[in-house]
Image: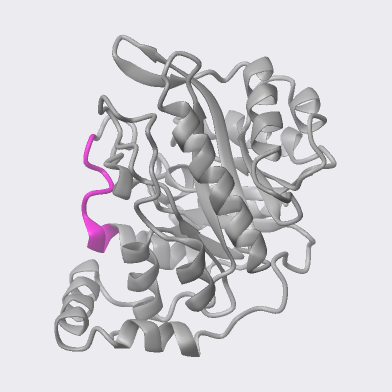
Amino acid sequence: MPDYLTATGEELVRAMTSTRLQDPGAIPAAAARRKRRASLVGESGRLMIIAADHPARGALRVGEDPLAMADRGDLLRRLAVALDRPGVDGFLGTADMVEDLLLMGALDDKVVLGSMNRGGLAGTAFEIDDRMTAYDAATIAAMGYDGGKMLTRIDPDDPATVATLEACARAVTELAAHHLMAMVEPFISHRVGGRVRNDLSPEAVIRSATVAAGLGATSAHTWLKLPVVDDMERVAAATTLPVLLLGGEASVDQPETFERWQRALKQPTVVGMIVGRALLYPPDGDVAAAVDRTVGLL
């Protein structure tokens, strides 16, 4: 395997495809020898996670480019840069993404979170029926990872919502049985013009957070992943669970985005951030600078 910090995207893809073809057992072996960190949070008492689970749900768009995340070699190079920056604590992704990074050797001393429900494919009629099609709790535990994440969209007009809620509640309980983090990302959602849209009003985010906090037989290991919206003081006050801020879409107005994040990080329940496209595909293309500035907020 080439040095992931100096290799081109094409070199990484060639090496990993060759390994997958000739030695698939290298993946569990890499997981077994991965150096794990002693605690979830870093020295700052905060947690900074890089996320890249969007492709598994068919969500490849960044800005005006509908296939920005489709080039796996380019994405891996961006992830290599981001994960190597000081203050970055870990990674969230589906098995294909996590295992690419395992083979690269990029996940030592990192928190690793497995994305669990990717069945609600973007733009489909069944999007709210967000089934568990990726990681399960047993595999997350067996591979030595630190937790699982589930997207939990609540559409009052879609009966499929209740099946998603039930599946997420089961996952929370199963992860807790292994003493692993359950990261729940809730939204109140509605179909607008045939597409699922998340309600980002403070009232909707508060409601979604209170529902998410009650999922499962115990909340001892549950964390929430919440968007940065207006009136974050009220939003953050709706729970005692640890909250990570959702970075959201890449923004042209980065200074305003960073200012909103900084204000939200002042709330007592907010303990860090989990950011994907906004840092991996910044407007100026400088991944390292975008990551460093975000880590500075923590």
Compared across the picture, whether 257 is left or right of 219 comes to left
Residue 173 pos. (x, y %): 63, 54
Taking the spot 69% from the left edge, 51% from the top edge, the residue there is 222
Asked if residue 98 is among those painted magenta in the image, a careful observer would answer: no
Type of secondary structure dominating the magenta stretch: loop
Compared across the picture, whether 209 is left or right of 104 comes to right
Q: How is the image coloured?
A: one colour
Compared across the picture, whether 39 is left or right of 229 comes to right
Taking the spot 79% from the left edge, 36% from the top edge, the residue there is 239
Taking the spot 39% from the left edge, 29% from the top edge, the residue there is 128
Looking at the image, the residue that sits furthest to the top is 193
* Numbered range of the magenta stretch: 66-74
Quarter-wise, where is residue 131 in the image?
Answer: top left
- Screen quadrant of the N terminus: bottom left
* Relative vertical location of residue 66 with respect to residue 112 in this rendering, above or below: above
Asked if residue 73 is among those painted magenta in the image, a careful observer would answer: yes
Taking the spot 56% from the left edge, 85% from the top edge, the residue there is 35
> Relative to the observer, which residue lies in front, 41 or 294?
41
User: Count the marks: how many?
Assistant: 0
Does residue 248 appear anywhere in the picture? no
Does residue 280 appear anywhere in the picture? yes
> Relative to the observer, which residue lies in front, 171 or 35?
171
Residue 4 pos. (x, y %): 35, 77
Compared across the picture, whether 46 is left or right of 171 comes to right
* Relative vertical location of residue 123 with respect to residue 61 in this rendering, above or below: above
Quarter-wise, where is residue 65 in the image?
Answer: top left
Residue 241 pos. (x, y %): 77, 45
Quarter-wise, where is residue 13 in the image?
Answer: bottom left
Residue 178 pos. (x, y %): 63, 69
* Relative vertical location of residue 67 with respect to residue 227 in this rendering, above or below: below
